[in-house]
Image (cartoon, rainbow, N blue to C red):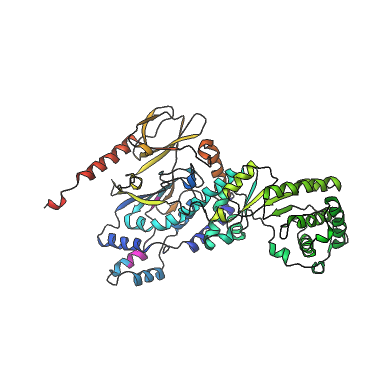
Amino acid sequence: MSTCEDSDVRADLKRSVMTRVPPLLTDLYQFSMAYAYWRADRHREPAVFELFFRDNPFGGGFSLFAGLNDCLVFLENFAFSDQDVEYLRSVLPANTDPDFFVYLKELDCSSVSVSAVPEGSVVFARVPLLEVSGPLAVVQLLETSLLCLVNYASLVCSNAARFRLAAGPWRRLIEMGLRRAQGPDGGLTASRYTFIGGFDSTSNTLAGRLFGIPVAGTMAHSYVTSFSSLAEVWPQTLTPVGGGSGIDFISQVKGRLSSVCQLLGSKTELIREGELAAFMSFAIAYPHKFLPVIDSYSVSCGLPCFCAVALALCDLKYQPLGVRLDSGDLCRQSLEVRRVFKECSKQFSVPQFESLIIVGTNSISEQSLAELNRKDNEIDVVGVGTHLVTCTRQPSLGCVYKLIEVRGRPRMKLSEDPEKSTLPGRKSVYRLLDTDGHPQMDLICLSDEPVPTAGVSLNCYPLVSETSLQSITPAQVTSLRLDVFTCGQITYPINSASESREQAQISLQMLHPRHKKLQEPHNYTVAVSERLNSLVSDIRRGNNKGSNFLLSN
């Protein structure tokens, strides 16, 4: 990306983030805790939080990490306006010390640093995705906003990756979920991160403008049903590609329609004049991009109309694109449509009909996409909306943001539910690769431990079975996290959506197929080092011993 393009992307991203995620977009209790820290003079204590999720989404074997760019821009511009502070003054208790509001007015992230997994990376449950360090009150205030930016972005990006796996590598996918999304921000976020997850384009024009995503679309049934007669077609002429006088397009189509009906054995009296008029009008407006929906009434009525209009376009040296199917048995209908295209190509010596595409839409789910691969069909492009952007199989990724260190001392949340316990202390995360270059384990170590060495055996404890010591010899070792934000400054490139998409596809390609299975994938191992396991055990034993602080002087 050129410097100019990078600047434009950064400016658009900043406007988008600051509009959607101002500092007040958080929970009230964050301010309550910040005030309590401030009153106790603990607000400047160095603290570290980490962000992770506990279970891979959709019953799958992996997730994709997304939302990092938004987090960085949010942190870089974090500051409360005078209006923000006055509002907080009105909702916090009346006896709140006025100096606290002075403190809030001066607050920013100049003392905050973040390390993170690169956006678009394959990630797994319990692996820390972000580590946020800085003054205790500040990093506490960031919790809700960072979770909001990462949770849905990663979830819908992972959902898109699963749809891509279900569809296979060659079938084009269009995200069409804006009208079904949870509000404008949900729709815009979905368009961006489904593209990163593997979709080829979006119907969302604002997402195309903001994020450089290819946009695509056809027509709605309402356009077809708005026409009732050929008298509504205007203009009625179309100039050939090579120029010259306009040709009477209505007459051209009528002539072709008779030949098509004769070839297909269709009765001309069953052709709906309004549907034919709609197709003609659209073709005259978009002769290079003619792709109508052909089942507003029935495919048997719409298909002959399409063929007649498309043949008339070919007569004038235009290349029609294809058709959209939006109801019924898409596989069966696509086979019939393709058969008709081939017959027309042969009968009328029009090779352009061999390259017409068939778009399928109609409440497409991951399951129905997988079924397309098991059945005979001729669908080239699939448009997906509701089940993609609303993540109907799982509404939330469940990311959490937990304290792991204060004043250089490790902190751990203990719980009666072992899954809700956290791992204490600052950490480094390494991805261990096998001899084929596939990830075989993510290893979580304390930050001051030596880096694992390729070819050297090490011992670790898988998180699913902490009492079972395991030995592994990695063929390659990579550090999973990078320093992305240091003392208030972004130190990691702000990638475009296309660059993040490329990162996601490379990361997914490295993952072994057994972990990418949509049903019953093999569990990927996430483990902790011996030292981290010992620290966890020590803290648990210390907690069980209790404390005699009440008896001390």
Left or right of residue 336, residue 80 in this image: left
- Report x, y in % for residue 519: 52, 41
- Seen in the picture, residue 453 relative to 147 is either above or below; the reply is above
- Report x, y in % for residue 381: 67, 49
Can see residue 298? yes
- Is residue 484 or residue 540 the one in the foreground? 540
Image quadrant where residue 533 sits? top left
Task: Indicate whether residue 311 is drawn in magenta.
Answer: no
Q: Residue at x 29, y 72 (%)?
A: 94
- Is residue 366 or residue 187 the one in the foreground? 366
- Report x, y in % for residue 306: 78, 56
- Is residue 369 or residue 240 the one in the foreground? 369
- Report x, y in % for residue 323: 73, 53
Can see residue 246? no
Q: Give the magenta range.
A: 101-113
Task: Indicate whether residue 109 is drawn in magenta.
Answer: yes
